[in-house]
Image (cartoon, rainbow, N blue to C red):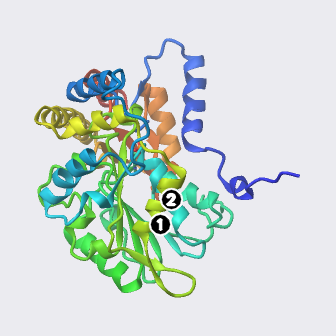
């Protein structure tokens, strides 16, 4: 008799985005004329940079000629892409990262989940609250947690609350944890970590032999020159951190799919016999066994991000979204709402007015303004009383949504 992975039964049944869809659909059915604007989902809206498109068109042509045709590529990604990433994203910022330590993949979502393959099942795991739900759910699936409680927390995980009280940067835990997920600039709060804050985490991780999973999916949105883009800008991070990056948000690759994971060769963790094992070797083995690389065409598209044109086009794309974020911040402040984020990240994190719950504010915004956002409580218990507005939309939609909020809320 076939049995299932029972851990899947512990998962909260796809709660946040399906519940948003349910409420929006029922409102739309009752008010078919309502001009609903969606500032909820964290997906990009603007087209791919032309440099990337041109490179992919050329790559398709390469595939049509026997002499330039490509079959299976290296599981780790093509050397020409990894070299460019190492130079432009890391070495240019003083990070000692070599191309051989970079693994190309089809997404950070899968990498942040798959990385658990190479770690033991007895680690203590810390996540921030609110959090990108993938970190939590993949640990539930792997059997690293108990059941969920009334507040939506799984037993067995260490939750580190982030809120206005601690400037949206988690307090370093007093207890020992083995694996720590950090995401800066943060989804959903839009918060960033200073060099001092990241240094405190690196020191904690080194003192406790912990590993930091650093998700830098939004690094390109940093505008403040003092904010680190990579954890490897911090001394000692090569001994304690894995970094995840993606082309999804900086170059609009959410539907094209390309990302990367950095596993420094200096990173080790303990085997059950007490010996130190290089994590790079395990991740390399994992990827070579379970993954066959990203399409040649897509990797050529990603490579074009580092050309002169690609750089200026992705910069323009990011600036466009960040102008949206600036407009959202300004207008919501004018509407007497307290806002956070949106300066170094494409998300504005709004404190709900008059002590409304996140879901009550969601309903109010939907019904009075026909604007959809994301309830903060959907990202974790400490997100209650907050609301996420995404800057990923057309200028027209952002202006119209803000006008309605000013006029009607
Ligand atoms: C969008 C996003 C990513 C990128 O995921 P992909 O699978 O590469 O598209 C990673 N982390 C966070 C927190 C995100 O919001």
Which corner quadrant of the image does residue 144 belong to? bottom right
Disc 1 to disc 2: CB gap under 8 Å: yes
Q: Where is residue 154? Give x, y as percent.
A: 61, 64
Which corner quadrant of the image does residue 156 belong to? bottom right
Is residue 16 among the parts visible in the rendering? yes
Marks 1 and 2 sit apart, C-alpha to C-alpha, by 6 Å
Picture residue at 45% right of the left edge, 62% below the top: 283
Secondary structure of residue under mark 2: helix
Depth check: 220 or 269 in front? 269
For the C terminus, give its image quadrant.
Answer: top left
In this picture, residue 65 sits left or right of residue 49:
right
Which mark, by number, is residue 384? Answer: none
Q: Where is residue 76? Give x, y as percent.
A: 38, 51
Q: Where is residue 365? Give x, y as percent.
A: 44, 33
Picture residue at 25% right of the left edge, 77% below the top: 236
Secondary structure of residue under mark 1: helix
Depth check: 269 or 312 in front? 269
Vertical placement of residue 186 versus 368, above or below: below
Q: Where is residue 190? Give x, y as percent.
A: 31, 51
Which mark, by number, is residue 282? Answer: 1
Which mark, by number, is residue 286? Answer: 2
Vertical placement of residue 103 versus 241, above or below: above
Q: Look at the numbered disc 2 and say if its residue's Cβ is closer than 8 Å to ligand 1.
A: no
Dot 2 crowding, Cα within 10 Å, few <14, some 14–19, many 20+:
some
């Amino acid at each position: 008799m076939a049995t299932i992975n029972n851990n899947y039964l512990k998962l909260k049944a796809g709660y946040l985005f399906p519940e948003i869809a349910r409420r929006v659909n029922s409102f739309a059915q009752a008010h078919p004329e309502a001009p609903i604007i969606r500032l909820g989902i964290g997906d990009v809206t603007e087209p791919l940079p032309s440099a990337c498109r041109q490179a992919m068109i050329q790559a398709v042509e390469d595939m049509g000629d026997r002499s330039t045709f490509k079959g299976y590529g290296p599981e780790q990604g093509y050397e020409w892409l990894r070299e460019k990433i190492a130079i432009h994203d890391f070495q240019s910022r003083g990070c000692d990262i070599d191309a051989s330590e970079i693994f190309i993949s089809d997404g950070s979502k899968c990498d942040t989940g798959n990385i658990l393959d190479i770690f033991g099942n007895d680690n203590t795991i810390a996540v921030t609250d609110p959090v990108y739900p993938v970190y939590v759910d993949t640990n539930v699936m792997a059997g690293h947690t108990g059941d969920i409680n009334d507040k939506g927390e799984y037993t067995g995980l260490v939750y580190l609350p982030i809120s206005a009280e601690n400037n949206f940067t988690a307090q370093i835990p007093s207890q020992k944890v083995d694996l720590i997920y950090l995401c800066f600039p943060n989804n959903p709060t839009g918060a960033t970590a200073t060099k001092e804050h990241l240094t405190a985490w690196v020191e904690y991780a080194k003192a406790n032999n912990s590993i930091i999973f650093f998700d830098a999916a939004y690094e390109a949105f940093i505008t403040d020159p003092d904010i680190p883009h990579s954890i490897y800008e911090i001394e000692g991070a090569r001994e304690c951190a894995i970094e995840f990056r993606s082309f999804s948000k900086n170059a609009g690759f959410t539907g094209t799919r390309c990302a990367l994971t950095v596993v420094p060769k200096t990173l080790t963790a303990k085997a059950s016999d007490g010996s130190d094992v290089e994590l790079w070797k395990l991740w390399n083995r994992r990827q070579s066994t379970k993954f066959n690389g990203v399409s040649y065409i897509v990797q050529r598209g990603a490579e074009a991000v580092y050309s002169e044109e690609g750089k200026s086009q992705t910069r323009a794309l990011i600036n466009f979204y960040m102008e949206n974020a600036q407009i959202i911040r300004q207008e919501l402040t004018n509407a007497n709402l307290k806002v956070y984020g949106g300066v170094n990240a494409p998300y504005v994190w709004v404190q709900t007015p008059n002590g409304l719950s996140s879901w009550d504010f969601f309903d109010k915004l939907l019904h009075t303004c026909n604007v959809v956002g994301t309830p903060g409580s959907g990202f974790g218990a400490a997100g209650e009383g907050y609301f996420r507005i995404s800057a990923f939309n057309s200028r027209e939609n952002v202006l119209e949504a803000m006008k309605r909020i000013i006029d009607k809320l």
